[in-house]
């Protein structure tokens, strides 16, 4: 612990003596720090916030047992889904199967609302949503 006189526990440092290692701290450290603090905040341009990782997105339950990646992983999944929705076309199947049955979706309420395929095309119990997926084409945007 440094005392007002400038002495350290074992040795003595004259008043005004600078401590530090030049290889770790640049000689213009004070100026560099002040320029970093006065620089604009990354992610904000013209007063508009752009999405990114915020402090509330990095913990799960907090405390000593925290998952630092839960919200981050959730955010990444949302970004992947958003990218896929822009490039892919999703549609419910309209073709009939080999027996001539069309897959119709019905919502059941047991513990949760779950989509099932109505009999005879499906069993009416297993949660299933059949989708036809393809790349977006120019015709998809014509009305």
Image (cartoon, rainbow, N blue to C red):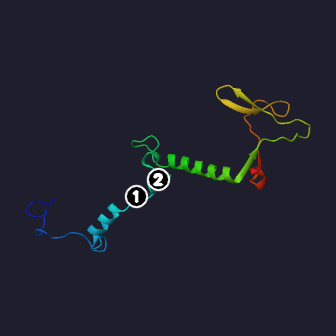
Between circles 1 and 2, the one closer to the viewer is: 2
Q: Nearer the viewer, residue 42 or 73?
A: 42
Q: Quadrant of residue 64?
A: top left
Earlier in the chain: of badge 1 and badge 2, it is 1
Q: Secondary structure at mark 1?
A: loop
* Pointer 1 with pointer 2, Cβ within 8 A: no
Q: Residues within 10 Å of mark 2 (few under 14, many from 20)?
A: few
For residue 138, side relative to residue 96 (left or right): left
The x, y position of residue 106, in whole percent, is 76, 30
Q: Which disc, if any, is residue 58?
A: none
Q: Which residue is mark 2?
A: 48
Q: Which residue is mark 1?
A: 41
Q: How far is the residue under mark 1 from the one under mark 2?
A: 11 Å
102 above or below 26? above
Give the residue furthest to the left: 5
Q: Residue at x 63, y 49 (%)?
A: 81
For residue 82, side relative to residue 15 (left or right): right
For residue 73, side relative to residue 107 (left or right): left
Q: Residue at x 13, y 63 (%)?
A: 8
Q: Nearer the viewer, residue 90 or 121?
A: 90
Q: Secondary structure at mark 2?
A: strand
67 above or below 8? above
The x, y position of residue 69, in whole percent, is 50, 49
Query: What quarter of the picture does the N terminus occupy?
Result: bottom left
Q: Residue at x 46, y 53 (%)?
A: 48
Give the residue furthest to the front: 143
The x, y position of residue 30, in whole percent, is 26, 67
Q: Residues within 10 Å of mark 1 (few under 14, many from 20)?
A: few
How many numbered discs, if any?
2
Q: Residue at x 15, y 70 (%)?
A: 17
Give the residue furthest to the right: 99
The x, y position of residue 71, in whole percent, is 50, 46
């Amino acid at each position: 612990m440094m005392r007002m006189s400038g002495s350290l526990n074992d040795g003595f440092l004259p008043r005004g003596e600078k401590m530090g290692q030049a290889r770790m701290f640049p000689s213009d450290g004070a100026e560099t720090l002040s320029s970093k603090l006065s620089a604009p905040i990354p992610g904000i341009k013209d007063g508009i916030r752009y999405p990114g990782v915020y402090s509330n997105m990095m913990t799960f339950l907090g405390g000593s047992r925290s998952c630092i990646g839960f919200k981050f992983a959730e955010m990444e999944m949302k970004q992947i889904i958003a990218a896929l929705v822009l490039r892919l076309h999703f549609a419910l199947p309209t073709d009939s199967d080999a027996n001539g049955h069309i897959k119709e979706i019905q919502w059941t309420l047991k513990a949760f609302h779950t989509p099932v395929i109505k009999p005879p095309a499906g069993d009416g119990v297993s949660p299933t949503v059949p989708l036809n997926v393809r790349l977006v084409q120019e015709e998809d945007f014509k009305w």
